[in-house]
Amino acid sequence: RTICHPPQNYPLYIRSVPTENELKFHYTVHTSLDVVDEKISAMGKALVDQRELYLGLLYPTEDYKVYGYVTNSKVKFVMVVDSSNTALRDNEIRSMFRKLHNSYTDIMCNPFYNPGDRIHSRAFDNMVNSMMMQVC
Amino acid sequence: MEPGPPGGPAAASATPAAAPAAPAGLPLSESEQQRYSELFSRCCPPPEAAAGGSSVGELFRASQLPPDTLHQITEVCGAKRVGYFGPAQFYIALKLIAAAQSGFPVRIESIKNELPLPRFVALKNDSDVRYGTPAELHGVKFQVPHATLEKNSYKRTDEGDKQEPKSPPMSPICSPPASPSTYQRIPLTYGYSKSRSGLEQQHGAPYEVRHSTHQQDGSSSGNYGAKPAHACSTLGRSLSVEREQPDSNAHYSDDPWRITEEQRDYYVNQFRSLQPDLNSFISGSVAKNFFTKSKLPIPELSHIWELSDVDCDGALTLPEFCAAFHLVVARKNGYQLPETLPDTLLPDYLQAASLKPLRDCALFDSYSESLPGSQQTRDFSRTEKTSAEEVPDNSALLQDTKKDDKQALKVSTAVKTIPKDFQHLTVKTAPQEPNALKARPRSRSYSSTSIEDAMKKGEEPPTPPPRPQKSHSRASSLDLNKIFQQNTQAVRSGWLPPPPPALPPRPSVSQTEQVSEVELHPQMNRPPSQAEENSSAKKEVVLVQPPSKPARRKLRTETQGLETPELSPTINVTSSVPAVKPHLPVQKQSSKQKRAIQTAIRKNKEANAVLARLNSELQQQLKEVHKERIALETQLEQLRPVTVL
């Protein structure tokens, strides 16, 4: 499940693979945004590493991990993954975020896209879907 | 017998026009009656009694009969004699078409028999044809066939003419056919051999706005609204035949995604009108304006862009542009957009297809400059259009990363490093400002300096403009970095981070800045537009801002094919440029330069204002930080005696 947030913290793009419980994911993502902001503020000038790995948002009932990623323009990508899916390693998460970031910039290149709009790009959808299929 | 084009029934339901009864003396079966009335109502808007010649023409074309057969049919059915397609004539014509398709000769006698329904090919896309305006227009044009023809001959501006307005035997030479005169030469091979010219006309319509001062803009745009897949046109089979002859050389297989030569020429001309250097790009904003004129919905345009901008750089090269244009045209004709770019539209393929005409343009040194220019213009347009200013800068950054193989590296790296520093500020909205500032001053001074550069013509395009900016932005970036370091130290020692209190003022300031910027743009748009409209050949003027208004104005008037769009791509121009285009007298250049300088001055003032504001905010922040520091120091002092003991 992927979500993409701009600095104003409304979601630009949401996609869930198991489509139930979407609301819960929304909530999770929003709470994680605070943590992301905290991380951003804590980082020094050496934030060349755009990645942020956030593990630990584990609820007592459901286990899942929330990963965050921030671009230079403060667009946040949040990914929620089941903890049961232990096959996902750090590298894979990183590469997934990189792919997301690349696709996002491709969207930005489109002059018909107004930053701040919801993302409707089919290419982006395809990319996200394929990525999620690989994982799940 | 196939029930006729699927669009037919849909169309019939959409237009509940009263179906005229079959003419007396003509036996029609039940199904024939129904079918004919449907077709008639399609071709004929309800209020009129006669079918619009254009739509009738299209229909006939769609029957895929040879033109002389169709010619014969029209003669026989009496339309020529009468001068219009009344219901009787129409029905007879349809019957004759059926007869001809069944192999019978075109005679009145043949239609007395029982015949299958006439077959019309490729009317399937008609389901969403809008009959209202276009049909009326057709009807109107119908009445003044000759007048339109004459008008048409005037309309021939660019392309040469292949107009040959012939004696329109029949009226309805819909002005559309002639009007987008240039477009006429662009047959779209959509599977019908004869129906091309209609398509051309349809497409030509919206772009007519650019072509010439057309009286019939309204009507043509109305025509554009109708997406019939048939060729419009006249019962003047002679006209159509002659017109089709040139089309015949473009007979590809029925691949709608293949661009024919005429189409390519048209696209190239359009590209040229937007961007004189055929080896350079059209920036995103200019392309956006251009394609928006086609009145396709934005999501579709967005998708078209995604398909055609293969290298995802936010700008269209000539092959990309041709592909995009072709997709627009296809969509307008009712073809659904593919999910991926068809092979025939790939830039490599298109580029391989000889583009000889393109070589006649001189290669400009400005090529390298076009990149930063286009980036900046895009940035600029984005800042104009959106409130999220950090995005354009980011996109410029990312574009920069992608364009490593181009010569814009110097500029791009300069741009990159500076904004990155800002990314790390704790204030969220702060980065917006500095980035926006960077984008703005950079592009502004770029335009002002570029004029002088252009004058000198001797300098390496990319480097000079950015230099003054570097120092400019670097200075401010250094200041901010210092402040930032202070902030981080504060944070580390456990103090409350100062930035949050400063947050509230920032957004408002940034907003006001955005507003003022937006206001400024329209103002600046006008002077550059005037400047450029008066521009002489030397497109040395490079007003980086990509105002949309001048673009439209320019394209519309199209006094000279040049008008460099504010697209800075053409910035610099070597003297070879003037040779390429027609020119206005050189004396206008000085006034243009003055205006350019004035706009540059205005921009600089704006930049100054913005920077002053930023400065004041930062000062405020500094004061707050100082206060906190003092507070903490006093606390420390108080604590110290305790530890001493």
Image (cartoon, coloured by chain):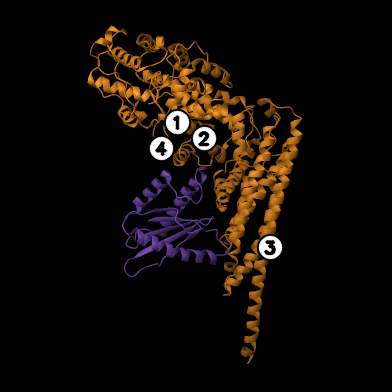
Chain colours: A purple, B orange
Q: Residue at x 40, y 47 (%)?
A: A125
Q: Are marks 4 and 3 on the same chain?
A: yes
Q: Which element type, helix, strand or loop, lies under badge 4?
A: loop
- Out of B4 and B283, give the one closest to the viewer: B4
The numbered disc on residue B225 is: 1
| Circle 4 residues within 10 Å: few <14, some 14–19, many ≥20 | few
Q: CA distance from mark 1 to mark 2?
A: 12 Å
Q: Position of residue B458 (x, y in %)?
A: 73, 36
Q: Position of residue A55 (x, y in %)?
A: 41, 65
Q: Which residue is mark 4?
A: B340
Q: Quadrant of residue B608?
A: bottom right
Mark 1 or mark 2: which is in front? 1
**Chain letter of disc 3?**
B
Q: CA distance from mark 2 to mark 4?
A: 24 Å
Number of numbered tags placed on the structure image: 4
Q: Which element type, helix, strand or loop, lies under badge 3?
A: helix
Left or right? Give the position of B544 relative to B260.
right
Q: Which element type, helix, strand or loop, lies under badge 1?
A: helix
B251 vs B509: above or below:
above
The numbered disc on residue B293 is: 2
